[in-house]
Image (cartoon, grey):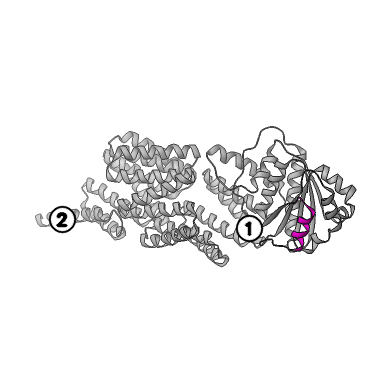
Amino acid sequence: MRYKSVTEAAGGEMEESVIDDLEEIDTIIAELEISKGKGNLILCVVNSPAYRDRIILTLSGRFSSKVILAEKGEQIIHNLKEPDFDGAEILIWVMPEEPTEDLLNTLNNFRELFYEVKLPNLMFYNRAFSESVIRKAPDFWRYRGNYYELEEAERGMAFEAIETLATPFSYQDKGDLLRRKRINEYLLEKVRDKQEKANILTELGRIFYHLGEINKALKYFEKALKLNEDLGIKEGMAIGLGNIGTVYRIRGELDNALEYYGKALKLNEDLGNKEGIAANLGNIGTVYRIRGELDNALEYYGKALKLNEDLGIKEGMAIGLGNIGNVYQIKGELDNALEYYGKALKLNEDLGNKEGIAANLGNIGTVYRIRGELDNALEYFRKALKLNEELGNKEGIAANLGNVGIVYQIKGELDKALEYFRKALKLNEELGRKEGMAIGLGNMGNVYRIKGELDNALEYYEKALKKFKDIGNRIETARTLMNLGNVFTQKGDKEQALDYYQKAERLAAGSSIFEDVRKRLNKQENKLLTQINAD
């Protein structure tokens, strides 16, 4: 089981009895882990049915479990003598509020059966039932393994923390992430089970990733990976490798990203984990897309989408459709791009996935911007920006600030455009996101070129070019070379312009800018030819 989410904690002091409960639940998890494949009988007294059910949900998230609601003695005997546990690793028995003589006699007389099934048994009942067992089923009581009394928790961080052990990771806004961060940090101090610790470290990494604190995310992902390696938990190792790969991708270290994604893919293939295979195929596709290797990107995205469709994983399908849309957008096939973005948006809306919705809205806005439908583009970008601000998603905020800036640039509102580009660049610098920084620098270069401030334009384009080369982004490198050629054209330096256009043409093949580069190159060549003939 992976730690996937945490819930909001109430304020105020933490109750000591509840902290003890959290530690005891952790001990129960450890005891059940050790007892797998063996007979064991653990008794657990919980007075509150709601609290008991939360604990059972936690344990069922960690172990393959069969929960049996015991009402009659013969039901217990039947289950233990003719076991049909559907691959369960543990048996969880829930006793009724009030004990009957029939149940007490069965427990006392057939106590050995709990050990003969070769599975750990965890039995829940209330304090009144416990007192009856001690008095009326003494042999069963003496035959037990460990015994725990857990107090009902009505408030406090620990009670909320218990709920986090089984619920999936999701968040609605930045406040959710900050609350989950606080609770996971609390859990990290309290939990003793190493596997659970690795899961908490992973979730903290994801929280910091979504908060835009990439270096902190990497630190937690690396700690989680080390712990999973020490424990020999391959599924956790695969998740960790993939997460670290994503941090390297965001930082523009694409060779490192590809190495980690490749290792994660191999482990998932060894495990037969199709969901993990699909995720890492998609991740590898994204590295190829950033590098401008669009056919490779499409191949990997297509494989990932097919796997997610076979598995019926809608979130993975939405990601895959959006990724394929991105490739078509770069290729200039805007109708195809819009079709894929629309399908992805519909799936994310069905899922209530705000982060996915924001990404799709921004991408659709980009298609409208390329088509020249600027009011539509601005509407989509603003919707995407608002959602990302609600989520506290710095990467998404930066992308859409840049998108809004481009619309203002096209409209000729250059000072407004510069304002948005500066905000986007600052956020990407905080994130350490090289690709975003390079795009921002290039956008600012565009504005200065349009303003006629050609030396400023050159400075920003050259900074952008260096970053695009560093991350190996072929197509954006070509675009920036073309922009540098445009500056030298404006300066009247035809030979320098021609040199940059020729370099851009070699890199632009297969992208939407190829024809634009070729036209500029041909125009510059004709000018030079005319000049030579005149001379």
Locate the C terminus by quadrant: bottom left
Q: Quadrant of residue 87?
A: bottom right
Q: Is residue 72 covered in magenta?
A: yes
In the image, 517 versus 481, the foreground residue is: 517
- Give the total of numbered labels: 2
Residue under the point 88% across and 51% down: 137
The residue singled out by tag 2 in the image is 526
Work out whether residue 129 or residue 281 is closer to the camera in this orientation and state it: 129
Coordinates of residue 315 in the picture (x, y in percent): 48, 51
- Give whichever of discs 2 and 1 has the lower sequence position: 1
| In this rendering, position of residue 392 left or right of residue 151 | left
Q: Is residue 195 above or below residue 386?
A: below
Q: Do callouts 2 and 1 mark residues in contact (Cβ within 8 Å)?
A: no
Position of the N terminus, as image quadrant, is bottom right
> Local crowd at mark 1 within 10 Å, few (<14), some, or many (≥20)?
some
- Residue 311 visible? The answer is yes
**Residue 255 appears anywhere in the view:** no
Locate residue 333: give its quadrant. Answer: bottom left
Depth check: 154 or 123 in front?
123
Q: Amino acid at mark 1?
A: Lys
Disc assigned to residue 226: 1
Within 10 Å of the Cα at label 2, are there few (<14), some (14-19), or many (20+) other Cα atoms? few
Please tell me which residue is depicted at 74% across the width and 61% down the height of the picture.
119
Q: Is residue 399 above or below residue 513?
A: above
> Which secondary structure type mostly characterizes the magenta part of the structure?
helix
Residue type indicated by callout 2: Asn
- Secondary structure at badge 1 equals helix
Depth check, mark 2 against mark 1: the one in front is 1
Q: Bounds of the magenta span?
A: 70-81
What x and y, as percent, mark residue 463? 38, 48
